Image (cartoon, rainbow, N blue to C red):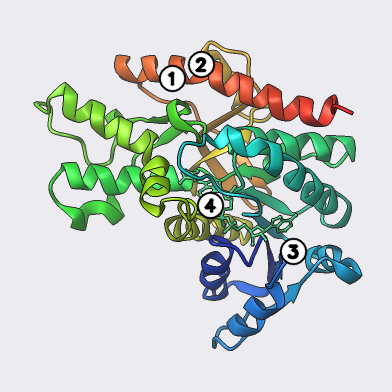
Amino acid sequence: MVKAVVLGAAGGIGQPLSLLLKTNLEVTELALYDIVNAPGVAVDLSHIATPAKVEGFLPPDNGLQKALAGAEVVVIPAGVPRKPGMTRDDLFKINAGIVRDLATAIATTAPKAFVLVISNPVNSTVPIVAEVFKQHKVFDPKRLFGVTTLDVVRASTFVAEVLGDRSLSPSVAVPVVGGHSGVTIVPLLSQSSHPLPSNLDTSTIDSLVNRIQFGGDEVVKAKDGAGSATLSMAYAGAEFTTKIIRALKGERGIIVPSYVNLTQEGGEALKKDLGKELDYFSAPVELGPNGVEKINGLGAIAPAERVLIDAALPELVASIEKGVSFIQTPKL
Ligand code: NAD
Ligand code: LMR
C-alpha cells in the first residue's frame, strides 16, 4: 500500500508524471492536487486499469490537506517554468512562496512523507522545504530529496550519442553531482559505466559537459516561450519516485544521485571532500526504507571534474543561503 501525491498535478510535468505513477503497480492511492483542473486529470487517469485509486483536489474545502492525508510520497512539480532568457533563479520570486506554502501543508498534514522537490530553482527550493519543516520541528533530512534525475537521464542520452550508439543510452550510468542549475550541474564522466574513448579530443568532452549542464536551455529555447522540459522531466521524476517506492518497500542497494541535506550519514565526509562548508549537495545516495541511508562520497575525481566542482560551489552556496533566508528572515 503506497499513497503518492502530486502537487501541481495539472501542469506540463504534473500530468504525464501522474500518468506514469498511475502505471506503477505499487501505488495503491494517487492524490492529485493543483489550483486548477486536478479533478479532471484524476477522473481521466482513473479509467486506466491499474490498482491505484485516483482522486483530484482543488484548494476549496481543504483540498490540499485532504490530498496529503496519509501520504507516503509527495512529489512537487508546482510552480512556473522558465521562458527563453530566464535563469532558474529568476523563478525564485514566484516559486519560493508556492513551495513554502505547500511545504507548510505537508509539515502539518503528512510530516513523515518522503518529499521529492522538482520545482525550480531546486538549489533553493529544497532548503526552503527543510526550513519550513524545521520551523514545525518535523525535519528529517533522510526524507527530503531534490530531484536531479533529469540531469542523469540527459547524461546517459548524450554520452550514448557521443559513443555513437543510442541503443546504449538506457544502460549508460553517469553520476551527476552538485546541484540543478547550469555550472552547478557536474557530470562525472570519468565514472561513466561506458567510458569515453581515451583519445576523445578535449573540445568534444567540453561540449558534452556543456550540453549536460545546459540541456534545460536547449528545451526552453526549442519550446520558444511555451515552457521548459515537461515530458523528459516526467519520465525522470517517475524513475526517481519509483526508486524511492522500491526502497521504502524494503529493497536494498539502490543508489541514486539526489540533492540532499548534508547533516546526515556521509555528509561530513562529503564536505571534507569538497573542501567547503555547505548544507546541500547532489551526490549519489544509498536509499533504504527510511529514505537516505548514507550519502556516498564522490569517488576518484578527474582533475577537470575537480575544477567543475570548484566552479559550482559559489553559486550553490548563494542559492542555498537565498532559500534559507527566505524562510528564516522573510522580508516584510
Ligand atoms: P506548468 O506551468 O506547466 O505547471 C505547473 C503547475 O503548477 C500548474 O498546473 C499550476 O496550476 C500549478 N501550481 C501553481 N501554483 C500552485 C500551487 N500553489 N499549488 C499547486 N499547484 C500549483 O510548469 P511545468 O513545466 O510543469 O514546471 C513546473 C516546475 O518544474 C517549474 O518550476 C520548472 O522550472 C520545474 N522543472 C524542474 C525540473 C527539474 O529537473 N527539477 C525539470 C523541469 C521543470
Ligand atoms: C531542466 O533542467 O530542464 C529544468 O530545470 C527546467 C529548466 O528550467 O531548464
Q: Secondary structure at mark 4?
A: loop
Cβ–Cβ below 8 Å for labels 1 and 3?
A: no
- Judging depth in this view, the residue of 227 and 279 nearest the camera is 227
Looking at the picture, how far across and down is residue 109, in whole percent? 86, 57
Alpha-carbon span between mark 3 and mark 4: 37 Å
Mark 1 or mark 3, which has the lower sequence index?
3
Instruction: Report which residue position mark 1 lands on.
Output: 309
Instruction: Report which residue position mark 3 lands on.
Output: 35
Q: Residue at x 84, y 53 (%)?
A: 105
Instruction: Report which residue position mark 4 lands on.
Output: 252
Looking at the picture, how far across and down is residue 11, in whole percent? 59, 63
The amino acid type, in three-letter code, at marker 3 is Ile
Cβ–Cβ below 8 Å for labels 3 and 2?
A: no
Q: Quadrant of the C terminus?
A: top right
Residue 188 is left or right of residue 278, and the answer is left
Q: Residues within 10 Å of mark 1 (few under 14, many from 20)?
A: many
Q: Is residue 280 above or below residue 175?
A: above
